[in-house]
Image: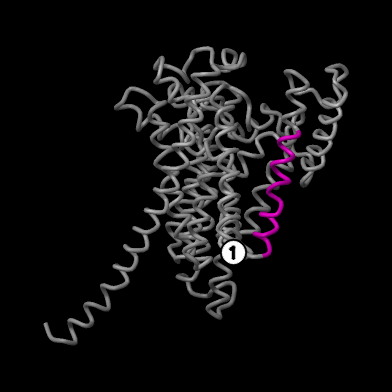
Amino acid sequence: MGVEGTRASRRTALPAVRLDVAWAHALREALVAFAISRALVLVSGALAAELLGQSGRAPGFDPAGVTHPFGGLGDALVAPMARWDTVWFLAIADGGYGDDPARPAFFPLYPLLAKAVGAPLGSSLVGGILISWAAFLVALAVLHRLAMVELGDARAARYAVLACALFPTAFFHTAVYSEGLFLALSIGAVYAARQGAWAWAGALGALAAGTRSAGVLLVVPLALLHLRARREAGLPPLGRRPSEHRPLLAVALVPVGMLAFCGWFALTGGDVRAPVDAQQVWFREFAGPFVGLWDGTVAAVQGARQLLSGARDPVYFTAAGGDPFVVAQENLVLLAFLLACVPAIVGVLRRLPVAYGAYVVAALALPLSTPVAPQPLMSTPRFLAVLFPLYLWAGLRLARASARTATLALGASAILLCVLTARFATWHWVA
């Protein structure tokens, strides 16, 4: 091979080398954040379960004991990963959807994977844990790469990953819940779009829509990223050649995940609307655009009134079951979570490309427009945990702050993560 051939070979090899180095760096950063945060989750959750035991609500939600099958130390270690909705996911993984009208609210990809991975081990619970942990590690690595693309700052990318791993409800990402898988798929879809890999973007988006109903909202950022790419290339919004329509076809692929789920019910003799109607079983109904924000504020104010009255009777807000003082506290915490994230939401809208802000608004519009009547902001802290643009903004903001301020902010988030993990592990409702 001549000198020119050698130089040409080097030129073609360099991009692949750079890509490998970039991913290796992203994986290292992800592993560090993953190790630190998961150690906190495991230790705080296991200690709380071992020392404090379970709340009285456990037998009613898990009468068969599927979330604590190992006994002793095994159950303590599993505690921060197997509570509440875990029972539903395992019921679907091991028994399908059956005739229970509440089960179709839980989309099929996660329980299917939990069953498949857990089959050789004889436990869908273990399979679900493995899926969640692996997916979250992938999510952190891809988040780092996306942060480098959008922010172009290694320090900001590191902080974005840490903010995600230490978010107060980040324990859901490694619990037997669909959050970790959904986060990996949604970040992956957007990252693929930013790389121009539209077939991957559409496929990952479709898988996300088969994981959670909110996955269909990925059409919003993907469509806007397509328009942005064409605008930056000096092209009109719609191309004339068939090859220029491939990104739009990829965007149109996203809802297939949800449509396939609905179609499966129709083909098996069920109701094609079962995944949609199941939301009503869980008390979610459309009340108007963002009405849940007002209703949640009213519920929190009335909750404060309940606590200040010092009496459980009369109940000043719509009854949600259980001790009125406990429900009042939950309503206050739910509103506090949402308000605490307002600066990040505004920051995303102001500092990041419009696709990210539009996605955050659309993702929040879904639960806030279909509030749970007894508790309007139900699960809001969990929904916020998968809104990855918030972590991009947090990374940018922390990178611009002093090292002391960034450390204090992440430390405070880590403390909340431990506290909420302990509550979750002891069967106290968190989100």
Residue in the image at 38% along x and 28% along y: 126
In this view, the residue farthest toward the left is 1
Q: Quadrant of residue 323?
A: top right
Q: Is residue 345 magenta?
A: yes
Residue 337, percent from left and from top: 69, 41
Residue in the image at 48% along x and 57% along y: 158
Q: For the residue labelled by badge 1, is the local secondary structure a helix, a strand or a loop?
A: helix
- In the displayed structure, does residue 317 sit left or right of residue 31? right
Residue in the image at 74% along x and 29% along y: 329
Q: Amino acid at mark 1?
A: Arg
Residue 221, percent from left and from top: 58, 59
Q: Is residue 180 visible?
A: yes
Q: How many numbered discs?
A: 1
**Picture layout, residue 384 above or below residue 95:** below
Residue 119, percent from left and from top: 33, 27
Neighbour tally class for label 1: few under 14, some 14-19, many 20 plus, Cα within 10 Å: few
**Picture layout, residue 221 above or below residue 175:** below
Q: Which residue is mark 1?
A: 400
In depth, the one of 422 and 369 nearer the eye is 422
- The C terminus is located in which quarter? top right
Q: Is residue 391 magenta?
A: no
Magenta segment boundaries in residue numbering = 332-350
- In the displayed structure, does residue 246 sit left or right of residue 423? left
Q: Is residue 97 visible?
A: no
Q: Quadrant of residue 389?
A: bottom right
Residue 77, percent from left and from top: 43, 25
- In the displayed structure, does residue 301 sit left or right of residue 264? right
Instruction: Give the overall secondary structure of the magenta segment.
Output: helix
Residue in the image at 59% along x and 77% along y: 236
- The N terminus is located in which quarter? bottom left
The chosen color scheme is one colour
